[in-house]
Image (cartoon, grey):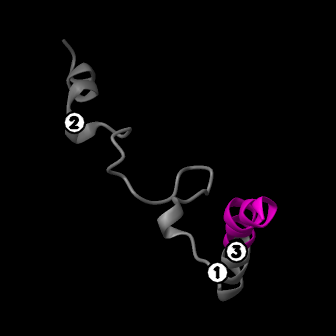
Amino acid sequence: MTADADHATDPAHDHDSGADVGHDPEGRTTAPMSAYTTDDVGIGFAVLAVGLLVAFALPIVLTL
C-alpha cells in the first residue's frame, strides 16, 4: 500500500466529510455563511404569508 492510499481512507484527510466549511474552488459558499439583508427577510415573510393564506385561509373560505 502506498502513502496516498493510506490518506484516502484516513478520516482526517477526507475532504468530502462535510467538516470543511468555507469557499469551494468555484467561489460558492455554504448557506449559513451567506449574508442576507432586511429586504430578504421581508420578502421571506411575504412569501410565508401568501403560502399560509393559500394553505389555510383559502380552503376555510371555500368551505363556508
Q: Residue furthest bottom?
A: 38
According to the picture, the residue beneath numbered tag 3 turns out to be 49
The mark found on residue 50 in the picture is: none
Q: Which secondary structure lies at badge 2?
A: helix
> Residue 10's spot in the image, x, y percent?
20, 31
**Counting residues from the N terminus, which is met first, the one under dot 1 or under dot 2?**
2
Choose the circle earlier in sequence order: 3 or 1.
Answer: 1
Q: Mark 3 or mark 1: which is in front?
A: 3
The crowd level at tag 3 (other Cα within 10 Å; few <14, some 14-19, many 20+) is: few
Q: Point out residue 11 in the picture as x, y percentages from the top left corner.
A: 21, 36
- Of residues 24 and 1, the one nearer the viewer is 24
Question: What residue is shown with label 1?
Answer: 41
Q: Magenta segment: does it hold 55?
A: yes
- Magenta region's main secondary structure? helix
Between the C-alphas of marks 3 and 1, the distance is 12 Å
Kind of residue at disc 3? Ala
Q: Nearer the viewer, mark 1 or mark 2?
A: 1
Seen at 78% across and 67% down, the residue is 61
Give the side of residue 8 with respect to residue 34, left or right. Answer: left
Please identify the quadrant where the N terminus is shown: top left
**Which residue position holds label 2?**
11
Residue under the point 36% across and 40% down? 15
Looking at the rendered structure, the secondary structure element under dot 1 is helix
Magenta-colored span: 48-64
Residue 2 relative to residue 23: left or right: left
Q: Dot 1: few (<14), some (14–19), or many (≥20) neighbours within 10 Å?
A: few
Q: Nearer the viewer, residue 26 or 48?
A: 48
The one nearer the camera, 32 or 25, is 32
